[in-house]
Image (cartoon, grey):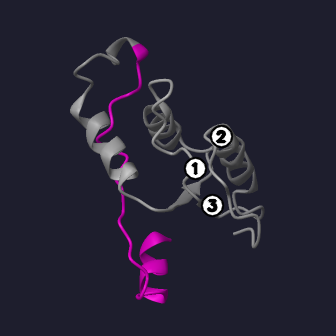
Amino acid sequence: MAHCLMKLYPSFIYQLISLYDIPIYNEDLETGAPPTGWKNFRESVRQQDTILFITPEYNRPVPAVLKNAIDVGSAPHGRNVFHRKPAAVISLSPGKMGAFGANHHLRQSLVFLNMPVMQQPEA
């Protein structure tokens, strides 16, 4: 989906942020030297003006890799890299509901992260 959007709207500036090199969040590792994958991810998010979340649906909510990225980016307390960044959500699945569950599950997290989320159109 991300690559299709990039082709449809080539005048936009995109930066794909990989979630696959982010170690599982563990508050015990939140020290003066957190894992490199956490630092890299947090810095990538900090550099963005807005965030477009594109997610599949796994058993109704978002995949664990996305939930982990949200946990890493929102920690430690008081240093949420998502804070006040405008966001939008696109969810997709081969099912008839188009990942409706994941879309709304993710929106609940974004409220907590203090991200203003585009309400319409739902995608």
Residue 25 lies within the magenta run: yes
Look at the numbered disc 1 and give the secondary structure of its residue.
loop
- Number of the label disc, if any, that sits on residue 84: 1
Reading the chain from its start, which is encountered first: label 2 or label 1? 1
Indicate left or right for 45 with 77 as reference: left
Mark 3–mark 2 CB contact (< 8 Å): no
Q: Nearer the viewer, residue 66 or 50?
A: 50
Picture coordinates of residue 67, whole percent (x, y): 53, 38
Which residue lies under the disc numbered 2? 109
Q: Amino acid at mark 3?
A: Val
Q: Identify the residue at horizontal 45%, vertical 42% (top origin).
A: 81
Q: Identify the residue at horizontal 50%, vertical 62% (top origin).
A: 50
How would you classify the magenta stretch by its main secondary structure?
loop
| In the image, residue 26 above or below residue 118 | above
Closer to the observer: label 2 or label 1?
1
Q: Amino acid at mark 1?
A: Arg
**Can you tell which quarter of the image residue 12 is in?**
bottom left
Callout 3: 10 Å neighbours few (<14), some, many (20+)? many
Q: Amino acid at mark 2?
A: Ser
Residue 73 in sight in this render: yes
User: Where does the C terminus fall, quadrant-wise?
Assistant: bottom right
Which residue lies under the disc numbered 3? 89
Q: Identify the residue at horizontal 35%, vertical 42% (top origin).
A: 42
Q: CA distance from mark 2 to mark 1?
A: 13 Å
Reading the chain from its start, which is encountered first: label 3 or label 2? 3
Look at the numbered disc 2 and give the secondary structure of its residue.
helix
Residue 16 lies within the magenta run: yes
Q: Which residues are magenta?
A: 1-27
